[in-house]
Every structure is written in structure tokens, then in C-alpha cells.
Amino acid sequence: MQLGIIGLGKMGGNMRTRLRDAGHEVVGYDMNPDLADVDSLEAMVSRLEAPRAVWIMVPSGDPTRQTVARLGELLDAGDVVVDGGNSRFSDDAEHAELLAGTGVGYVDAGVSGGVWGLKNGYALMVGGDAKHVEALMPIFDALKPPGEFGFVHAGGVGAGHYAKMVHNGIEYGLMQAYAEGYELLRASEHVTDVPAVFKSWREGTVIRSWLLDLMDRALDDDPELEKLSGYATDSGEGRWTVEEAIRLAVPLEAITASLFARFASRQDDSPAMKAIAALRNQFGGHAVKPED
């Protein structure tokens, strides 16, 4: 099957390679000419035979919106666009409506797998009309891991990105739990080999996971994590998950706390913790640490 891919960074470039290894013909476009197969979106579209399929892997928000709009001008009725980036699910209806006026289909695809997807496959959560999803199944089958898991048609337009949003919210919570366990083990006078403890958990325990494997890998490279700063960004999905929890009145204590922990990581000297220290000193005479 033919596929155009727009955006050939770490994810898009590896997806192109995996698809080509599976025998598909991929025409890639990127603003970096060193990565691209063609020098323009027009050239990419002209290389594809109708009905065309084009997969977008660019940053969410305006870059995706502008790319969808431009494809609406270049593609024909019967073609289909896949947004495989980390768009907010509420953007998908807008994108689908924009393309519907020209008869172009739209599928949203939440993609998980990171830099390991080339070797292991990508978990795909897709939303859209069943006929568009069915037409793209050869591509989905090549990208997903082997076996029965790793793909879901989650529902209509927006369902794929919604599922990926919740997936990433859960990821926040899992990472926070591993991180807190790591800190407690390091603080303990009883445990002398923290990396070995994490390594031991990789088999036979109920907390084993790919994230645990990656934590073990990180500790192999840097047992004390001395090469890293304790600063963690968030890419948006965690916030959107919490916003949806508020909208639907669903209690998400662990995921919400993990998001706020990332905010705290960006403060060299937390104003909130200064206030707590001041209050403890006021009501209980507890010691405070002066500024250096």
C-alpha cells in the first residue's frame, strides 16, 4: 500500500522505515530536506495514486491544523488523512469537518511506542468511520506489534486521541509511583543497592512493566541519576486528562497528583513549600532553613 507521511522526526522517520520494511511504499515530506523524499506537499501528493492516504506526524495545535487545511486543498474526494500526532481529541471534529467539505476522510490515531516502536511496533488507538479505518488496516497491521494486542478502533472521530490521552495520564501515574519508590529506597538506611532492587522486580512481581524495564535501563546507565536534573515537562495529555476528569466529575487522584508533581519539579525553590515552612515555624516554632 502507498502512504504519504508528513513529519519525519524520531517517530515519523521510524514509522516510515518500519512500513518500508513491511513492503509498503512510503513517500515522506519534512521541512528538513535531509529527511524528506520530496521537496513539497504538492510533490508528495503527486507521487501517490488515488485513493490516497496521508499520515500527519507534526506538533499538535496550529502546525497540525495548518497541515490538515493544506491537504484539504490538495487531496480529492475518497482520499483519507490520518492525524497520528498528539492532538487534543476536541480538535479532531474540527479537522474532520474541514476535510468533509471536499470528501476527504479523517482518522485520528493515538500512537504509543516512542523510539522503540521501530523494533517493537507501535500501539495504535484510532478513531473514525469504519470504512476509513478498514481501508488503512494494511498500514495499521504493519505498524502495530505482532499478535492480537496493540490496536483498537476505539470509536468515532476523536476516540483515538481520547484513548491516547487517558493512556498518557495513566503513564504519568505509573512513572510517579516508580519515582517515589526510588526516592524512598535511596533515603532508607536499610537498602544498599537500589538499582539491584529495581532489577529484581522485572520478573515475578505484580509491578513489572515496560516502564520498570526502562527504569532499570536508566539506572544501569547512571545508578545515582547524577547526570539528570529533577525537571520534568508535560506534553499536554496529562493536563487534558485531568480537565476531562473535572468535566465528568471522575476522581483521578493519582494522575492529578502526578501532574502537579511535574509542576513542582520546575521550581528551584517552591513558594508553596516556603509558605508551609513559615506556617510551621509560626504555629509550632519548627526550625526553618535560611536562604544560602
Image (cartoon, grey):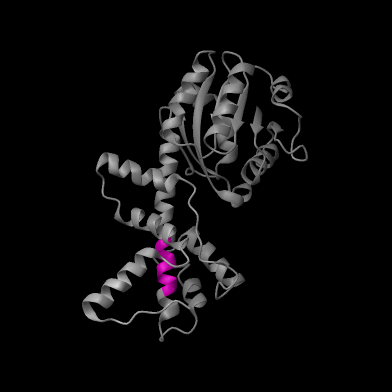
Q: Position of residue 193 (x, y in %)?
A: 50, 81
Check the image and report above or below for 278 versus 240. Answer: below
Which residue: 74% across, 23% down? 43
Closest to the observer, 178 or 30: 30
Check the image and report above or below for 60 versus 182. Answer: above
Observer able to see residue 153? no
Q: Quadrant of residue 41?
A: top right
Looking at this view, name the residue that lies furthest to the left.
283
Which residue: 47% across, 60% down? 266
How many labels sit on residues? 0
Which residue: 40% across, 75% down? 184
Q: Main secondary structure of the magenta part?
A: helix
Residue 58 magenta: no
Q: Is residue 13 left or right of residue 289?
A: right
Q: Position of residue 135 (x, y in %)?
A: 54, 24
Which residue: 44% across, 35% down? 160
Closest to the observer, 2 or 269: 269
Closest to the observer, 39 or 282: 282
Q: Which residues are magenta?
A: 176-183
Quarter that holds the N terminus: top right
Q: Position of residue 33 (x, y in %)?
A: 77, 37
Check the image and report above or below for 185 versus 82. Answer: below
Q: Position of residue 11 (x, y in %)?
A: 62, 44
Q: Quadrant of residue 2?
A: top right
Residue 178 magenta: yes
Q: Quadrant of residue 31?
A: top right
Check the image and report above or below for 99 versus 201. Answer: above
Observer able to see residue 23? yes
